[in-house]
Image (tube, helix red, strand yellow):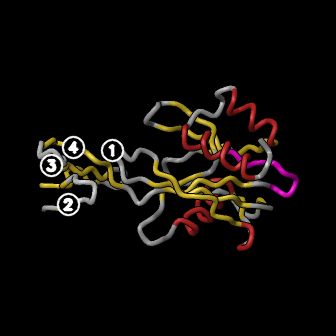
Amino acid sequence: MENSREDGWRVVESEIVIETPHLRLRRDEIELPSGKRIGPYFVRESRGFAVIFAITPDERVVLVRQYKHGVLTSVLELPAGAIDLDEGPEACARRELAEETGYVCEAAGLEHAGAFFTDPTNSTTRFHLYIARNVQPLQSQRLDETEQIEVSLATFAELRRYVAGGTIEVATHVASIYYVLDRLGRL
């Protein structure tokens, strides 16, 4: 496989070395613009995920607390989840919000706030940030077998304290919260 980039990097060889439902890892051999070769260069491939900043009619934000095996502890964050093979980011956002929390929003109540890379050095992952307005708890949670999720609500003031004080410490969620609070003029 030879794949030249406009910036001069060239993928000389590429191979998927791990492929599971939870991880797809690619090993590349790269030729730099200088002609020097580097490798193995590992890249985690992903369809990405959606993060949902969900606001209730009384202006509280929906949060979830769940165990994350990578860090061996439970974390407090916004509802979020991986984009499935057969869906786009918006469908993922709607599905994950409903499954994780039981909250849903009307079609007009979901706004795409942006898309961001999480770690462009070693990953193809992009996350899509959505603002869901006037969400209502209209159904029961439908959790995956690996999920045990506690749902809570926070005011904007509480949310700012959680981020500033380190109660919410997942980088994509910290950035998402500050981004949306700024966008809403609520920083």
Q: Residues within 10 Å of mark 3 (few under 14, many from 20)?
A: many
> How many marks overall?
4
Mark 4 / mark 3, whichever is N-terminal: 3
- Report if the CB atoms under discs 1 and 3 are less than 8 Å apart: no
Mark 1 vs mark 3: which is more N-terminal? 3
Instruction: Say what amino acid the circle numbered 3 marks.
Output: Glu
Tell which tag, 1 or 3, sits nearer the viewer.
Answer: 3
Q: Is residue 139 above or below residue 59?
A: below
Give the spatial CA distance, label 3 vs label 2: 9 Å
Whole-Å distance between the Cαs marked 4 and 3? Answer: 11 Å
CA distance for labels 4 and 1: 8 Å
Q: Residue at x 25, y 59 (%)?
A: 5
- Residue matched to label 2: 4
Magenta highlight on residue 24: no
Q: Quadrant of the C terminus?
A: top right
* Outermost front residue: 34
Q: Nearer the viewer, residue 97 or 124?
A: 124
Helix, strand or loop at disc 4?
strand
Residue named by callout 3: 31
Circle 2: element type: strand
Residue stretch in magenta = 56-63
Residue 67 appears in which quarter of the rendering? top right
Quadrant showing the N terminus:
bottom left
What residue sits right under mark 1 in the picture? 122
**C-alpha distance separating marks 1 and 3:** 16 Å
Closer to the chain start, of discs 4 and 1, is 4
User: Residue 45 at x, y = what percent?
Assistant: 33, 54
Callout 2 amino acid: Ser
Task: Please report contact status of discs 3 and 2: CB closer than 8 Å, yes or no.
Answer: no
In this view, the residue in front, 107 or 121, is 121
Q: Residues within 10 Å of mark 4 (few under 14, many from 20)?
A: some
Q: Is residue 68 left or right of residue 177?
A: left
